[in-house]
Image (cartoon, rainbow, N blue to C red):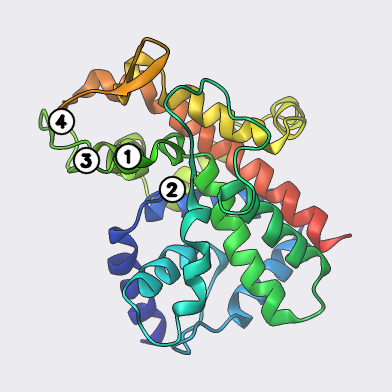
Amino acid sequence: MRIVLLISFLLFTSSKVWAWGNDGHRIVCAIAQKLLNKTDRNEVERLSRFYKAPDGSSFFRFTEACLFADTARSKAQDGVPGWQGFAKFEKWHFLNLPRSSKAVPGTACADNCVLFGIQTHFDLLRNSTLDRDKAEALLFLAHWVGDIHQPLHISYEDDRGGNFIKPITGGFYPSDHLHAVWDSGIVTKARGQTDWWIYAGILKDRITPAMRKEWLAVPRSRWAQESYDIAITALARYCRWTNNECRRIAGGRSLDMAYQQEFQDHIELRLQKAGVRLASLIRSALHP
């Protein structure tokens, strides 16, 4: 009963924040876990079950623990007692750029964006001798790696990565703003009636050793660039390049099947890359 209540709690609280939808994060973490050996999978599950949230709740499996960063953010924003310590991670879910930027610079953020979050929690998972710190680091690291691969997480502050671009019309996506289309709308349409864990397995099975090798050779700043390149393409209809700036396009968006057909492959590739790269980081951190 406690597990059911916790999962329901996560489903409702995570809907008010800006991140991959629940399925996206679960899929990334499921792919990563499938790519680990049995010993490392068991350690990931042990740390996930070990962790206790400020309200005393815990997790049954890693793929649910991957959602915790959104819950923590929501609770901190609402000022819930015991959760304020997570407020410092507010901006670690994304990376904001100037509208004149076509590239993510190596100095894109000093200590307050998703790249910094990945490095910080990777270091903590790798170096801490305390299970609680290692568990918390694992939960946040998994979430940050998912976030950096969501294209509209590398975007612009003035529209909150598309949160302010609404309404979404056309009758194809139930999402009410553009960010939500990329969080969950495209993923939901892509998997259709297939359960998310089966869909994760399908995506994982499509990954070849050559793909893994290629993706792992890419530095983290390029992970952000890969996302940004998708976000600012004209077909994404997030912004329009005018006079060397990707300027806001007024109003909402009417999106249909053609949009899904254009970007489904991109989103599936982002999920696959995130899973492969997360597995590599976990493996490295567990075996310093």
Label 1 or label 3, whichever comes before in sequence order? 1
Question: Disc 2 on helix, strand or loop?
Answer: helix
Label 4 or label 3, whichever comes before in sequence order? 3
- Asked whether disc 4 touches disc 3, contact meaning CB atoms under 8 Å apart, the reply is no
Label 2 or label 1, whichever comes before in sequence order? 2
Find the distance from the CA under tag 1 to the CA under tag 3. 15 Å
Find the distance from the CA under tag 2 to the CA under tag 1. 25 Å
Mark in front: 1 vs 3 = 1
Rendered image quadrant of residue 177: top left
Q: Which of the numbered marks, if any, corresponds to residue 177?
A: 3
Label 4 or label 1, whichever comes before in sequence order? 1
Q: Position of residue 136 (x, y in %)?
A: 62, 72
Horizontal arrangement in the rendering, residue 52 relative to residue 245 (left or right):
right
Find the distance from the CA under tag 4 to the CA under tag 3. 8 Å
Find the distance from the CA under tag 2 to the CA under tag 4. 24 Å
User: Which residue in the protein does label 1 denote?
Assistant: 158
Residue type, mark 4 in image: Gly
User: Which residue in the protein does label 2 denote?
Assistant: 24
Question: Disc 3 on helix, strand or loop?
Answer: loop
Q: Closer to the camera, 64 or 232?
A: 232
Horizontal arrangement in the rendering, residue 240 relative to residue 216 (left or right):
left
